[in-house]
Amino acid sequence: MTGIRRILAVLAATCVPLAAAAQASLYEYRGADRMEKIVAAAKQEGTLTLYTTIAEKDLPAVIKPFEEKYGIKVNVWRAGTDKVLQRTVQETRAGRYDVDAVHFGSPEMEALAREKILAPVASPVQKDLLEGSVPAHRKWAATILSVWVQAYNTNAVKKADLPKTWQDLLDPKWKGKLGIEAKDEDWFATVVHQMGGEKQGLAFFRELVEKNGISVRKGHTLLDNLVVSGEVPLALTVYNYMPEQAKRKGAPIDWFVIPPAIARSNAVGVTVHAPHPAAALLFYEYLLGPDGQKAMTSIDYVPTNTTVASPMQGVKIVQTDPIESLDEARKWGKLFDEIIVRRAGK
C-alpha cells in the first residue's frame, strides 16, 4: 500500500473532466484471427509509448525481446508511482494523448480505470493468470507479483525452530527478534483477513506486539540487510528475491513462508486514447503471455501466468486486493500505525 494514501490527493489535484472516446475495436475483438490482426496492425503503427515504474536496470530484459520479435519500438518514460499516476491523469484530462500503455502497481491501475483512462480488453491469456489478476471490468491485468516472505538469519535461527503458523510467533523465544517494514499496510490487511476476519486478526497482532514486540524498519532492502547482519533475526515482510539473491552470494540468510504467501501485484493496461492501440495491445499480450512472463522471471520477478515456471512454484499465494487497497487505505494505514508502528520498541 506504499503511496496509496497519496493517490486520492494526486487525483484531486487534477479536476478537468475527461472527454469521451471510443475504444480501439481490437481491444474487444474475439475472433480466431485475433493475434494475426493485432500483429499486422501493430507493425503498421511501428511504435508505442509506455509509462512505467519498472526499474531502469530491468527494462532491457523486458523490452528488448518484444522489440526484436516484432520490430516495434517501445518508447519508455519511467518514474516513481506517484509521478506516473499524476502525469497519466493530467495529460489525459488536458486532451494530450501520448501514452499507449501503462505498467505499475495494481491499486494505481485501478485508480486510472476509475478515471476512465484505461480500456477493457478481452484476451484469451487472461484465463491463464492467477486468481485475482483480472478485475471484472478487465481494464488492467496483473503481470508480476512482489511476494512477501519471511526471512531469517541462519546463524541466529535454526531451521527446525522456524514458526509454521502465525500463532507460533507468540512463543516467548521470539521476543525482541522480529522485524517488519514500516509501510506494509496492505500485507497487514490481507494477513488479518486470512486469520478469519478483523476481530481475530487485529487481536493477534495486538497480542504479538504486546508479548514479543516488532522492530519497525523503513525499506525492504534495509530490513533484508539487517537480517543478514543479525540485528533482526527474523523479518516478517521482505520481498522473495531479496533474501534469495543475498543467499546466492553467501550471506547467512534464508527465507520461508508462513502460509499463505501474500503478494502485491503490478499490472498493465492500454489506454482508451492510445495513439498506437494495436501496438499497445500487442505489448499487453506480450507481457501477460509466455514470452514476456519468462523475460520477467529471468530477472527474479514472480509471474502471474500459471503456465510459466515460477520461483515460488508450489507456494500458495494470495494477492492483496487492489480495490480494497485503494478504497480503505486510510483505515488500514491507521490500524497499522496504531497497532504496529507506534508501539515499536515499547
Image: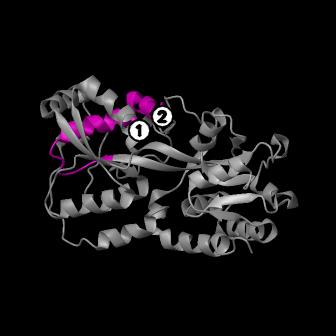
Q: Residue 30 has which mark?
A: none
Q: Amino acid at mark 2?
A: Ile
Q: Is residue 189 left or right of residue 178?
A: left
What's the residue at 48%, 62% (across, down)? 325
> Residue under circle 2?
299
What's the residue at 16%, 53% (across, down)? 97
Mark 2: secondary structure: loop
| Label 1 neighbour load within 10 Å: few <14, some 14-19, many 20+ | few
Q: Nearer the viewer, residue 243 or 261?
A: 243
The main secondary structure of the magenta stretch is: helix
Specify the quadrant of the image occupied by residue 177.
Answer: bottom right
Are the residues at dot 2 and dot 1 in contact (C-beta closer than 8 Å)? yes
> Residue under circle 1?
58
Q: CA distance from mark 2 to mark 1?
A: 7 Å
What's the residue at 26%, 58% (across, down)? 88
Q: Amino acid at mark 1?
A: Asp
Q: Give the image location of residue 144, x and y in percent.
A: 46, 42
Q: Give the image location of residue 149, x and y in percent.
A: 64, 47
Instruction: Tell me which segment is drawn in magenta.
Output: 269-298
Q: Give the image location of residue 262, x and y in percent.
A: 59, 50
